[in-house]
Image (cartoon, rainbow, N blue to C red):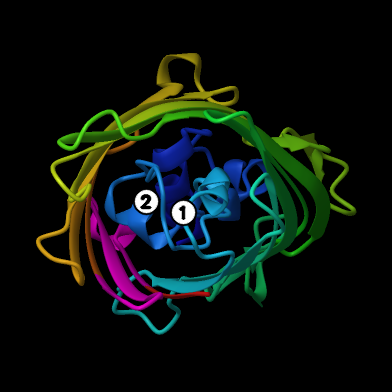
């Protein structure tokens, strides 16, 4: 079962599919998105009331609200008793019009798998899990350019434990207010998941983090910025050389001030994914849902999230 779950994460980041990938990957690093971005297959919104620590941190610098809290839970809707669950919480605070700070926490677990020793004998069961605590900073440079950085401590357990320092850096360009109908444009680039090697205690093996480079853009159109759409590409520095590129595109339409409808598609060499999302927004409170539909049903994921901005 763990091999199947890791294959899901590899479908997003293409890190390899052998059984040894259990110790070569950190599945938790492939789960992060805010709820808007999750519904749009990873397209990053230009501005948002969400605490977008794990998708578009620079959005904290735009808008009128300076304090944001977000929580989401993701569940793999499988019929067995051990459901894979993902938890993500973050808080963002804009110190002034030029800079802001983030604090985030992530947890992935809920699965039970047999433990097989080096002799091939089953010795009970284990509960693989990852968790991370992250700090972030974002800053505005002039009217259009902004940058962000994130550093975190991650612990991964899979019968043995690994302690990892992971970091990400990114920069965005925004052009706001082209016209009444063609609203805003954003282009973003980032390098994510780099730092110390993943070394599990007692195993003597060391692996690189699933580092990737991401390039994406999005635009808003129509009066009131009621339609957002965008696309992106990710290049993976680990994994098979012929399976390192992943493409995504998606969008969001807001029929009114309260309702948001989202959809997107991920083209991956390990299996394409359709995403759907829905949001209800009222006076700084947002309730959101997202669904990932993989060609293999055991890889599907349901997410629910709550955001409060002040």
What residue did someone put label 1 on? Answer: 33
Name the residue rendered at 57%, 71% in the picture. 109
- Residue 24 seen from this side: yes
Residue 307 is drawn in which quadrant?
Answer: bottom left
Name the residue rendered at 59%, 25% in the picture. 238
User: What x and y, as percent, mark residue 279?
Assistant: 25, 69
Give left or right: position of 173 versus 79. right
62 versus 185 height, above or below: below
Q: How dense is the environment of label 2, judged by Cα within 10 Å: few (below 14), some, or many (20 and up)?
A: many
Q: Give the range drawn in magenta.
A: 280-304
Give left or right: position of 133 versus 292. right
User: What x and y, as percent, mark residue 51?
Assistant: 53, 62
Residue at the bottom extreme, as displayed: 81
The quadrant the N terminus occupies is bottom left
What residue did someone put label 2 on? Answer: 37
Residue 90 is drawn in which quadrant?
Answer: bottom right
Residue 88 falls inside the magenta stretch: no
Seen from the viewer's position, the closer of residues 112 and 150 is 150
Seen from the viewer's position, the closer of residues 18 and 111 is 111
Helix, strand, or loop for circle 2?
Answer: helix
Seen from the viewer's position, the closer of residues 117 and 85 is 85
Q: Main secondary structure of the magenta part?
A: strand
224 versus 142 height, above or below: below
Give left or right: position of 241 versus 91. left
Residue at the top extreme, as displayed: 241
Residue 105 has which mark? Answer: none
Please report contact status of discs 1 and 2: CB closer than 8 Å, yes or no.
Answer: yes
249 versus 279 height, above or below: above
């Amino acid at each position: 079962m763990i091999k199947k779950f890791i294959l899901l994460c590899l479908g997003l980041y293409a890190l390899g599919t052998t059984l040894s990938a259990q110790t070569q990957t950190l599945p938790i690093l492939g789960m992060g998105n805010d709820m808007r971005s999750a519904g749009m297959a990873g397209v990053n919104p230009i501005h948002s009331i969400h605490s977008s620590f794990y998708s578009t941190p620079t959005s904290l610098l735009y808008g009128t609200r300076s304090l944001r809290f977000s929580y989401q839970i993701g569940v793999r809707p499988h019929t067995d008793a051990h459901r894979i669950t993902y938890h993500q919480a973050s808080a963002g605070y804009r110190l002034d019009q030029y800079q802001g700070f983030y604090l985030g926490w992530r947890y992935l677990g809920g699965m039970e798998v047999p433990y097989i020793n080096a002799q091939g004998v089953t010795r009970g069961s284990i509960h693989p899990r990852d968790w991370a605590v992250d700090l972030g900073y974002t800053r505005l440079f002039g009217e259009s350019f902004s940058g962000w950085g994130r550093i975190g401590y991650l612990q991964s357990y899979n019968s043995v434990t690994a302690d990892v320092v992971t970091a990400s850096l990114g920069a965005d360009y925004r052009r706001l207010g082209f016209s009444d109908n063609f609203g805003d444009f954003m282009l973003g680039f980032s390098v994510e998941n780099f730092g110390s090697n993943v070394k599990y205690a007692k195993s003597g093996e060391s692996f690189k983090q699933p580092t990737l480079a991401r390039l994406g853009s999005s635009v808003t159109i129509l009066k009131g910025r009621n339609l957002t759409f965008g696309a992106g590409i990710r290049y993976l520095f680990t994994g098979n050389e012929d399976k390192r590129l992943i493409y995504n595109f998606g969008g969001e339409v807001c029929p009114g001030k309260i309702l948001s409808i989202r959809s997107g598609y991920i083209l991956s060499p390990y299996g394409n994914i359709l995403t759907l999302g829905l949001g209800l927004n009222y006076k700084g409170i947002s309730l959101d849902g997202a669904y990932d539909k993989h060609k293999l049903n055991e890889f599907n994921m349901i997410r629910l999230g709550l955001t409060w901005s002040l």
